[in-house]
Amino acid sequence: MAYFFLRLAPPRPRFPHDATGEEMAAMKRHVAYWHQNAEEGSAITVGPVFEGEGAWGMAVVSVEDQKAAQALADADPIILSGYGFRFDILPMPSIILRPSAAGNE
């Protein structure tokens, strides 16, 4: 397995504070998608990061390779919505997990 950091860049600097109803509906599908990936084991952690007057999204995933990380990003409903979001996908050569996060509880 390989680890990747996915950074979801929003379409505007003030997003989500200036989000439309349609964008928020797409965000609900985005959240459901990542919950599913977390339950299936590919997403280790996912969430918003507030910065300045807006926010961006992040995920750390454990997948076979960069192609699989790209496939996760490409299948995200927020990307498929066409609202101007994009992912940066960065390899992580190693990660340190606390035991409970690694499933050793």
Image (tube, grey):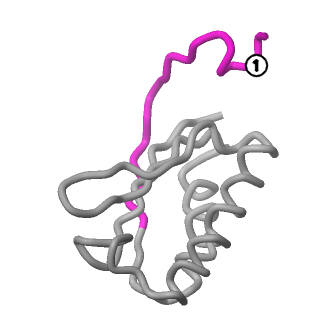
Q: Residue at x 63, y 70 (%)?
A: 28
Q: Which residue is mark 1?
A: 103
| Residue at disc 1, secondary structure | loop
User: Which of 11/24 is in front?
Assistant: 24
Identify whether 93 is placed above or below 26.
above
Q: Is residue 89 left or right of residue 59?
A: left
Q: Horizontal and vertical percent for residue 4?
A: 49, 43
Query: Considering only vertical position in the picture, is 64 above or below 72?
Result: above
Question: For residue 32, what is the image quadrant?
Answer: bottom right
Measured as percent of width and height from the top left, residue 89 is found at 42, 54
Number of marks drawn: 1
Residue 82 picture location, percent across and down: 49, 89
The N terminus appears in which quarter of the rendering? Answer: top right
Vertical relation: 54 (above or below) 62: below
Residue at image position (71%, 52%) is: 35
Q: Is residue 86 magenta?
A: no
Residue 16 lies, in percent from the top left, at 38, 70
* Residue, far left: 52
Q: Amino acid at mark 1?
A: Gly
Give the crowd class for mark 1: few <14, some 14-19, many >=20 residues within 10 Å.
Answer: few
Q: Quadrant of residue 45?
A: top right
Which residue is rendered at x = 25% and y = 72% of the image? 14
Task: Using the image as rendered, state which of residue 3 and residue 48 is in the foreground.
Answer: 48
Which region is colored magenta?
87-105
34 or 21, nearer to the observer: 21
Label the magenta part by its dominant secondary structure: loop
Q: Quadrant of the C terminus?
A: top right
Is 16 on the left-hand or right-hand side of 95? left
Q: Is residue 2 left or right of residue 32?
A: left
